Image: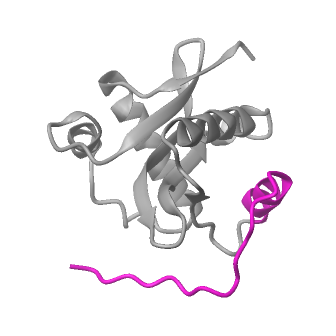
Amino acid sequence: MGNVNIRKGEKRDMKAVMELIQELADYEKAPDEVVINSDVLEKEAFGNDKIIDTLVAEIDGTVVGAMIYYDIFSTWKGRSMYLEDFVINSNYRRMGIGEKLFDRLIAEAKKRGSAKIKWQVIDWNEPAIKFYEKLNASLDGVWIDCTLTL
C-alpha cells in the first residue's frame, strides 16, 4: 500500500466519492436508495449555496475513502458538526485509513469551534461499531431517529 494522503475533497473527486456512497448503500442493503449523482454532490460541495464539505483519503492518486460532513447547531452545546457519511473502499478497510480520516475530521471540527461531532451507525454494522468504540465515541441507544421524507 502506498502513502495515504488525507485532504479536502475537490470537484474532480466527486465521481469517486459518489462511487463510495453507492458502495456504502450496497453494503447497507439499500442499493436503490441513492438518488443523487456526482453533479448533485459537486453542486452541494462547491456551488454558491454549498452545504457540505468532504474529506478524501487517496493512495497513489486514487480516492479510497471519503467523509461528507456539515455544520449543525446544538441548543445545548452550540456549534457542532454532523458526519453524514464515512466510507472506505472495501479493499482498503482495516489499514488505518479510517483513523486518519477521523483524525483529520476532528482537527477540522476543532478548527471550526465545534463542541461535538454527531453521526449514525446502523445497528448490525459490528466492524464500524467497534471502530467507533475504539475512538471512545458514545453510542446512544436511547434516541430514536426520525425522518420526514418530502
> Is residue 122 or residue 71 the one in the foreground?
71
Residue in the image at 79% along x and 33% along y:
95
Q: Position of residue 21 (x, y in %)?
A: 45, 49
> Is residue 84 or residue 90 the one in the foreground?
84
The correct choice, above or below, for 75 with respect to 99 in the image is below
Residue in the image at 80% along x and 51% along y:
135
Q: Is residue 6 left or right of residue 69?
A: right
Point out the image quarter for the C terminus: bottom left
The correct choice, above or below, for 95 with respect to 6 in the image is below
**Secondary structure, magenta segment, majority class:** loop
Residue in the image at 69% along x and 75% along y:
123
Badge count: 0
Q: Is residue 93 left or right of residue 20?
A: right
Q: Quadrant of residue 44?
A: top left
Task: Please state the extent of the stretch shown in magenta in the rendering.
Answer: 126-150
Q: Position of residue 8 (x, y in %)?
A: 46, 27
Residue in the image at 54% along x and 65% along y:
77
Q: Position of residue 54 (x, y in %)?
A: 43, 37
The correct choice, above or below, for 51 with respect to 142 in the image is above
Point out the image quarter for the N terminus: top right
Q: Quadrant of residue 35?
A: bottom left
Residue 147 is a magenta residue:
yes
The correct choice, above or below, for 31 with respect to 22 in the image is below
